[in-house]
Image (spheres, rainbow, N blue to C red):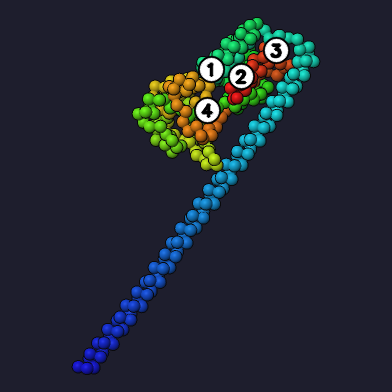
Amino acid sequence: MVEQAALQVERDLAAQAEANRQAEAAAHAGHAASANEAAAVAAREAQARQAAAEALRTREAADAERRTAETAAQQAAAELQARETAAERAAGGTEKPQGLLRVTMPMWFANHHVCSWLAEYCRLYPAVSLDLILDNRKIDLVAEGVDLALRVSSVDLPPTLIVRPLSEIAFYLIGETEYLQRHGTPATPQEILTHNFVQASYVDMEHIKISRDGEHFNLAPNSTIRADNTPMVREMVLAGGGLGYLPAWTVKRDLDSGRLVRLLPEWRIPSATLYAAYADRAFLSAKIRSFIDFLVEKIKQEAV
């Protein structure tokens, strides 16, 4: 009996030792798995940080390239104006602004802000008659007898034309007052995405990048309504159809009256360049020059 009891004790001790060994092995395996998982998480975090740093470098390089291009365009415009002035003086420079001036411009120029400028131009130059063609299409200035084209993109302008950048046009994110009272006023770019949005179909909202103090956000709102006409977009926003992204000139009066509210004013919203295009001539006629100079001056006053 004593021998059997001793044998049982030995078996129990051996079983306990085996259990302890297995438990220790499992613990080691668990530590190894945890270590491997921690290493994998650290690797993913490092990759994410590297990707974020690369994206930031890409955006900064793009911003630097854009600023360089804008500076070059401004210098080119100044040089072009200097050459035109010299050519006009060489030709006598005594011509007065007079006659019919045919100007094509975007449809959204049909707003109170721009119309007040045009009325002032007519008072300053009573010998000039304006024929305004509101159209966004590509136009053959010479074939259609148009003196001047105003466009917010130089992409569709023929290379045979003289193209001069005039100014940057600000764009605003806006919302109608009662709509915002019902649905809330977005305070962050992320909250913009929770609202209905009325979008101009010629604007690629997926590539509208806004920024603030080094922070960047790619604005891709929920466009429930699209239209190829800027005044229509404005009217839909005023009707409470959703938020909008519009040229500042088109909504200035609505903002002043309180019908519309500018959203995220502390964020930098991309602007658009206004270009003047006209046929290549020995020198610029007085009526075209007077109109361009007048616009530049009014825009400059607006920016002050």
- Position of the N terminus, as image quadrant, is bottom left
Q: Marks 3 and 4: in contact by CB < 8 Å?
A: no
Q: Nearer the viewer, mark 3 or mark 1?
A: 1
Q: Secondary structure at mark 3?
A: helix
Q: Amino acid at mark 4?
A: Phe
Q: Secondary structure at mark 4?
A: strand
Residue hosting label 2: 298
Q: Amino acid at mark 1?
A: His
Pinpoint residue 96: horizontal percent, then vertical percent.
Answer: 71, 9
Q: Which mark is residue 64?
A: none
Q: Earlier in the sequence, mark 2 or mark 3?
A: 3
The answer to whether residue 120 is visible is yes
Q: Amino acid at mark 3?
A: Ala
Q: Marks 2 and 1: in contact by CB < 8 Å?
A: no
CA distance separating discs 1 and 2 = 11 Å
> Looking at the image, which is closer to me, 146 or 27?
27
